[in-house]
Amino acid sequence: MIKQLAIVGGTHGNEFTGIYLLKKWQDNIELIQRGSFNTETVFGNPEAYQANKRYINSDLNRRFNQVELENRTLTGLEEVRAKQINQQLGPKGDPRIDFIIDVHTTTSNMGPTLLLTAKGKFYNQLAAYVQMNMPEVVISCDEDHKTNQEQHFLSSIAKHSVMVEVGPVPQSVLRHDVFEQSERMTLLILDFIELYNTDQLPQFPVTIDAFRFLETISLPLNSKGERIAMIHRDIQDKDFAAIEPGQPLFVTFAGEEICYQGDTTVYGSFINEAAYYDNNLAMSLMEKVTLNCR
């Protein structure tokens, strides 16, 4: 039974959609309340929002590993903010909040994507319900192989969580379609939890398709750590499309193609995400999987 739920927006200060959705819901709280559970809202990183940055010192959504939360010597702004949010919603391991929805946007052409943070029938049926009512949603399994204690996402404070990820939208920009898709997906998650709590779940398909994270690949660098290539035009904006062995992934500034060296078909996500340039990350590679829903 899920009794206490939190919706988080603004974990990244320049992802405006979640922040303005929180403003809307705070003014119309009935939109996110359901009969069997209580919903509250949390503004993840208001300081970064005021500075119009993703973060001030470090990525807040990477600060919630159990070991780091317990390390009192970490005093960066996001490290302190993580401990505050953990105290407000947690503590992780024995949380006050049963379920967290963390609302994000991306500059990548991922469309509306539901990120599952754990495995199991509950998550598979949640994904199926969202996709039944919003067929354009892509299901992505992101670090669902890790235990809750190991995960570093904000949403991992709760025992159960998902992340809403919609794009493309530039940083520090609002787009009507992305705003609507983010809101619709979030409300469908709330509806599913209400049906789950009240034992009124509908009939689900036997299976649904999803993508599971394999690895992250970096932009090509020279010996000085300088970028020497960019995402190939045949890959750009093709999130969740097949990438075959030998297919060009990058092109150098001199025009030389750099190809995928793997021996199996994979799928890209977060392709050319602007926020990941600080770490020279090019994309995530995924495998296509089947989730059992009954």
Image (cartoon, grey):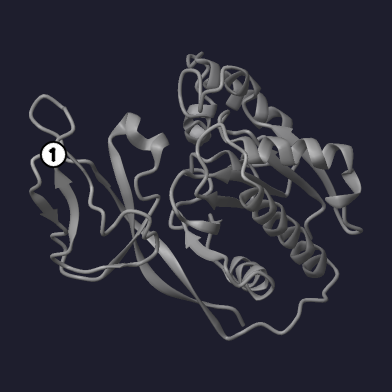
Say few, some or many: other residues with alpha carbon within 10 Å of mark 1 (under 14 / 14 to 19 / 20 or more).
few
List x then y, in percent, for residue 35.
92, 58
Q: Is residue 124 above or below residue 277?
A: below
Q: Residue at x 12, y 52 (%)?
A: 258
Q: What is the secondary structure assignment of the residue under circle 1? A: loop
Q: Residue at x 72, y 36 (%)?
A: 20
Q: Nearer the viewer, residue 89 or 277?
A: 277
Residue 177 visible in rendering: yes
Q: Is residue 68 above or below residue 198?
A: above
Specify the quadrant of the image occupied by residue 36.
Answer: bottom right
Quadrant showing the N terminus = bottom right
List x then y, in percent, for residue 97.
74, 43
Q: Residue at x 60, y 65 (%)?
A: 123
Pointer 1 residue: 253
Q: Residue at x 50, y 15 (%)?
A: 76
List x then y, in percent, for residue 168.
50, 49
Query: Mark 1 belongs to which amino acid?
Result: Phe
Quadrant showing the C terminus = bottom right
List x then y, in percent, for residue 220.
16, 40
Q: Nearer the viewer, residue 227 or 48?
A: 227
